[in-house]
Structure formats: C-alpha cells, structure tokens
Image (spheres, grey):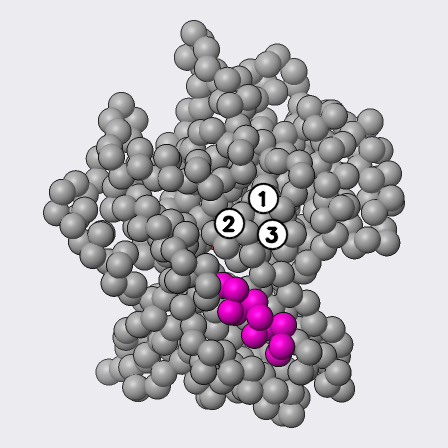
C-alpha cells in the first residue's frame, strides 16, 4: 500500500475538508529547496514550507549542531532549570531584535507565541491595577488558530462555530496611504469608548491576507496613538521575522518599536517547532513583584527545548552570514525583474514585493479554496513547483538558498499558469 493510501486510514489533516480533498501527497525526503514524493517526483519548495525552512531543508550546518546537542541534553523542565542553548539563544536574539526588546519567553508554535503576547498585554494592565478588557486588531489580520489568536484574527472565514466564545476585539482597516486618516479616526473613537489593553498587528506584510502589504506611515501613526494611550503594541512577526522583509525584523523598519514581538516559523530554520514572545523591560517590570500572583503563570511542557534552541542559534548564525545576506539581496533583485516582466500581462491585476516576499494578484475572481485555485495548485505541482495560491493571489517566499535557475523555473511556471486560467 502506498503512503497516500495508508494515510487515509487514521489521519485527519489540518485546513482540510477530507470529503473534497481525500488525498495528500506523501513526501519521503527533502533537501535544500527540493521536496521528493513517494513516486519520485520533485518539487521546488517555493514557499519554504510555510516560510520555515529559509536556509533550505535538512540544512547540514543546523543538523550537525543539533546532532551534537542531542547527545548532550535533550529535554528538561524550564521552570526552575536553565541551560546554555536557551541562554545563548536569548543573547543572540536580543542582539538583532529592535533595541527596546530585553526579555524572551519560550513556547512552541506561532499561535502560542500570540497567546502569550495577549496574556502579557492583559496582565500588564491588571498588575498595574487598571482594568482594560478589549484588544484592537486589523480587519484582515491572521494570528493563529488557538482561541486568543483566533479572536484577534479577522480572517476567520471558517471560525463561525467558535465566534461566541471569543475575547472582545475591535477592528480597524489596514492603512493603505489614502484611508490613513479614517483609520486613525476609527481608532481614536474605539480608544475613547473602550478600555483598550493592546493592539496586535502583522508589521508591513499580512501573510494570510494573501501577502497584503500596507502603508508604513499609517502603521506608525497607529502605533504612536497606541503609545500615547498606554496601549500595549504586539508585533506578530511569526511570518515576517528573520529577514523576509529585507531587514532582520519588519519592526526594525519602523520608528516606533513594539512592546512585544511574537516569533516562530523560521526561528529554527524549520527543523523543530519553537516560538518566542519577546518584550521590553517595561513589560517585564510590571510582572516583577513580591506578589507571586503577578508573575506570568504560563508554561508549555516543551518550553525552550534545548535541541530546538540549538537549531535556532545555528539558524541565527546562518541568517547573519554573508552568504545568506547576499542571497537575500539576489532574490530581492530577481523578484524585481520578474515583476517588471509580468506586471503588464493581461491576466495580472497587480504585483507587490517586500524583501523576498513577492505576490501577484490575478485579474479574476477566485474563491480562497475553490476549484480554480485547485486547478492552479495542481498545475504548479504537475510542473514541479510547490506554490499555494491564496484566493486570486500567487505568492513566492522561497528559501534564501534558492538558486537563480530554480527561481527562473518558478517564474516561467507562473507565466505558463497564466495561460491555463
Ligand atoms: C503562521 C502564523 C501564525 C500561527 O503560527 P502557528 O505556528 O501556525 O500556530 C501566527 N501569526 C502569523 C502572522 C502567522 O503567519
């Protein structure tokens, strides 16, 4: 029996309506930018497996470090104990995070890093004796699938059954340069009429909103208004973190620094699940007390797993290497050229790019998980490219190690795909 067939017996896949999509492709191995399936087909991983494997799959540099660590210390409770991999990671991460970040809190996926960010913001005010009970988020933001994260996500198309259990969130549109004043007015109105604890946002690029890129000045004005009102700002950099936007973190391009930052996805180069919520000294100080109840009583069993921390330290070294920094520059350049080549195509509505993230909107209506979208996805797979269109958006976010030749193959296949729709 093939893996594909055995899979069907017991496995329930994420984001899948099994009646409509009964089969998964079985991947047997991966190396650098290529995925190999059980029938010996090869696919270029043009989205770095949801933006995680940015240094290529099964990266030897990370693997060697992790292998050594596995023989030294595998797992230990992180409450009451500490270890070198976590300490080293905190030191190295703080060096490249926005200057105001001082403390890191560990968890194991993007959604939990958001939950922790939300809890930090709510408890910050509670510890200071002020009752603030709502959060602000963008209308089309995405922050994960656990309850707090779902509550702040605006893109909850399929979250209907849970909505009545959500925490209270007021939404504002993303600023696009022309609506900035309206967004600010709406925000002011919300602040005047509510006790707002925090504002959560994906800086510069909203991933699940189909790589929506928005106005940096508009975001700056929002953050300023939040600061003036002592509203805790939470930058969800789960997708944008670690070089994707052309700087180590998107927040580094903004004049106003967030109080809290959520990180995961590329943190370990895709080798192991891990997440971090970092924060400023000011946030940490609000929890530092003789009163035990003012501490942050949140833990995950695998918090700061030493092997995952080691993978993250090795990944950070790669990120800062000349080799990776040069590849990032090269990818940015080739995407620009591809954009110029394709922008006037009759089926292309618009293109956009931030750092290594490239997206194009097709000039046709498409459902997020509809038939046309499936047709496109299948076309890419049949042509050896793993790309997941989001509605009528095709986007590329390939590993930094991708070659020019592989990039050219992705571009050509996208151009061919325009001919079949
Ligand atoms: C993927 C993602 C999350 C959720 O991370 P998971 O590890 O899938 O739980 C949260 N926020 C953003 C911006 C993301 O891209």
The numbered mark at residue 81 is none
Q: Badge 1, how many Cα within 10 Å: few under 14, some, many 20+?
A: some
**Is disc 3 placed on a helix, strand or loop?**
loop
The residue carrying pointer 3 sits among few (fewer than 14), some (14 to 19) or many (20 or more) residues within 10 Å by Cα, namely many
Residue visible at 60% across and 52% down? 142
Discs 3/2, front: 2
In the rendered structure, does residue 278 fall within the stretch colored magenta? no
The quarter of the picture where residue 351 lies is bottom right
Q: Which of 72 and 403 is in front in this view?
A: 403
Alpha-carbon neighbours of circle 2 within 10 Å: few (<14), some, or many (≥20)? some
Estimate the spatial distance between the alpha carbons at disc 1 and disc 2, rounded to whole Å: 7 Å
According to the picture, the residue beneath numbered tag 3 turns out to be: 142
Say if mark 1 contacts mark 2, CB within 8 Å. yes
Q: Is mark 3 within 8 Å of ligand 1?
A: yes
Rendered image: mark on residue 248: 2
Q: Is residue 406 left or right of residue 150?
A: left
Q: Nearest the camera: 191 or 202?
A: 202
Alpha carbon separation for disc pair 3 and 2: 21 Å
- Find disc 1 in the rendering and name its residue: 252
- Residue at position x 61%, y 87% in the image: 415
Residue 112 image point, x, y percent: 46, 42
Please give the range of residues in magenta: 328-338
Query: In x, y percent, where is residue 159?
Result: 60, 53
- Ligand 1 within 8 Å of disc 1? The answer is no
Image quadrant holding the N terminus, namely bottom left
């Amino acid at each position: 029996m093939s893996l594909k067939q055995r899979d069907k017996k017991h496995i329930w896949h994420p984001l899948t309506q099994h009646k409509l999509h009964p089969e998964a492709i079985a991947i047997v191995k991966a190396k650098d930018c290529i995925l190999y399936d059980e029938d010996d087909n090869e696919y270029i991983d043009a989205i770095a497996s949801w933006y995680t494997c940015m240094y290529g799959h099964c990266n030897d540099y990370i693997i060697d470090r992790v292998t050594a660590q596995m023989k030294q210390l595998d797992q230990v409770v992180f409450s009451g104990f500490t270890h070198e991999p976590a300490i080293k990671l905190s030191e190295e991460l703080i060096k490249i995070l926005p200057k105001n970040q001082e403390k890191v809190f560990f968890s194991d996926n993007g959604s939990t890093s958001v939950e922790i960010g939300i809890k930090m913001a709510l408890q910050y005010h509670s510890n200071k004796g002020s009752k603030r009970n709502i959060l602000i988020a963008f209308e089309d933001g995405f922050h994960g699938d656990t309850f707090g994260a779902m509550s702040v996500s605006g893109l909850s198309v399929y979250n209907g059954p849970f909505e009545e259990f959500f925490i209270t969130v007021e939404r504002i549109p993303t600023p696009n340069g022309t609506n900035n004043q309206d967004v600010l007015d709406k925000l002011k109105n919300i602040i005047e009429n509510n006790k707002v604890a925090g504002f959560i946002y994906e800086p510069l690029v909203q991933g699940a909103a189909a790589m929506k890129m928005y106005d940096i000045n508009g975001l700056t004005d929002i953050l300023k208004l939040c600061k003036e009102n002592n509203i805790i700002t939470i930058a969800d950099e789960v997708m944008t973190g670690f070089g994707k936007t052309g700087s180590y973190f998107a927040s580094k391009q903004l004049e106003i620094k967030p109080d809290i930052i959520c990180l995961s996805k590329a943190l370990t180069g895709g080798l192991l699940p891990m997440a971090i919520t970092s924060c400023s000294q000011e946030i940490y100080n609000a929890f530092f007390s003789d009163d035990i109840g003012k501490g942050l009583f949140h833990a995950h069993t695998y918090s700061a797993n030493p092997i995952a921390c080691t993978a993250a330290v090795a990944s950070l070294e790669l990120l800062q290497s000349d080799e990776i920094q040069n590849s990032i520059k090269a990818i940015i350049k080739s995407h620009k050229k591809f954009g110029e080549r394709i922008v006037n195509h009759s089926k292309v509505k618009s293109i956009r790019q931030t750092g290594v993230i490239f997206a194009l909107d097709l000039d046709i209506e498409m459902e997020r998980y509809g038939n046309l979208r499936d047709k496109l996805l299948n076309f890419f797979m049949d042509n050896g490219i793993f790309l997941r269109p989001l509605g009528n958006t095709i986007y590329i976010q390939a590993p930094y190690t991708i070659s020019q030749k592989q990039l050219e193959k992705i571009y050509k296949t996208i151009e061919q795909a325009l001919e079949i729709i």
